[in-house]
């Protein structure tokens, strides 16, 4: 009888040990789950912080660009006034009725004052003319509209400015429209000489 009681007692102890082990295992599993959740939350927080930082940088960049280039479209439209002044001067200076007259001189002087004032205002707002004449053609700044034969210049050198180009700080407002030099084609030159020679000979024969 006593032996049976001892066996029952030992069995109860074994059950209690097993239950304690199961409880420990449950707590350990819960601890692991908690650690995983904490790591997951830390990752989410890190990603959220990185996204906020990226948004802040983008906002700062957009704010700076708005401050630096906010008048970009207006500045480009304003260049039309500079062009119209240039065209007006050219038209007046080539008007046969006005050539060498006092009226023309005074008008051109006034137009020059207005033009210089406009260029000065543009400079104050970080808008500068692009240097073109005698510069090597730069596709980032110049747009070649035509080629002019010239053996005195390196091929691809800007020899004529059709329309002025402008930069706004480090950004292209509009390219310069230019004519660039190219080597004289000897065959074409000889052909022209032969044609002239034939024309002169034909005229002398007629006489």
Image (cartoon, grey):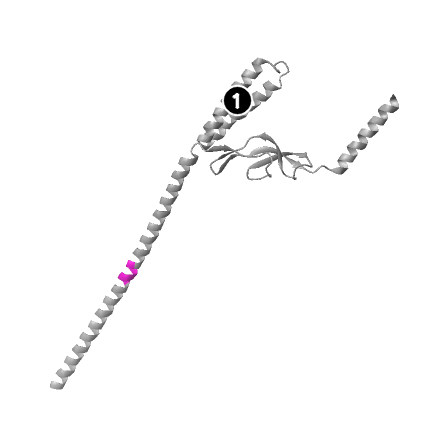
Q: Which quarter of the picture shows residue 204?
A: top right
Question: In front: 24, or 167?
Answer: 167
**Which residue, given by chain and number where applicable, does mark 1 sit on?**
112
Kindly identify the residue that appears in the image at 40 percent across and 41 percent down. 61
In the depicted structure, whether residue 55 falls above or below residue 149: below
Please provide percent x and percent y for residue 36: 30, 61
Q: Observer-nearest residue: 58 or 103?
A: 103
Is 40 situated above or below 167? below
- Whether residue 59 sits left or right of residue 114 in the image: it is left
User: Measured from the top left, where is residue 138 in percent x and y?
Assistant: 58, 39
Question: Where residue 34 appears, x then y in whole percent?
Answer: 26, 61
Magenta-drawn stretch, dominant element (helix, strand or loop) = helix
Query: Residue at horizontal 56%, vertical 13%?
Result: 103
Residue range in magenta is 33-38
Whether the magenta-drawn stretch holds residue 35 is answered as: yes
The part of the image, by quadrant, that contains residue 89 is: top right
């Amino acid at each position: 009888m006593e032996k049976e009681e001892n066996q029952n007692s030992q069995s109860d102890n074994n059950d209690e040990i097993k239950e304690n082990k199961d409880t420990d295992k449950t707590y350990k599993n819960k601890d692991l789950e908690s650690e995983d959740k904490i790591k997951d939350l830390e990752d989410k927080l890190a990603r959220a912080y990185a996204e906020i930082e990226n948004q802040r940088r983008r906002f700062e960049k957009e704010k700076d660009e708005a401050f630096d280039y906010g008048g970009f479209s207006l500045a480009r439209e304003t260049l039309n006034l500079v062009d119209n002044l240039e065209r007006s001067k050219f038209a007046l200076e080539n008007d046969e009725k006005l050539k060498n007259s006092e009226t023309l001189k005074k008008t051109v002087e006034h137009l020059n004052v207005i033009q210089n004032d406009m260029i000065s205002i543009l400079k104050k707002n970080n808008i500068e003319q692009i240097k073109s004449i005698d510069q090597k053609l730069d596709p980032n700044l110049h747009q070649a509209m035509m080629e002019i034969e010239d053996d005195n210049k390196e091929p691809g050198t800007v020899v004529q400015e059709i329309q002025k180009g402008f930069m706004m700080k480090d950004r292209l407002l509009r390219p310069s429209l230019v004519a660039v030099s190219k080597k004289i084609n000897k065959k074409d030159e000889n052909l022209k000489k032969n044609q002239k020679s034939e024309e002169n000979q034909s005229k002398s024969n007629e006489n």
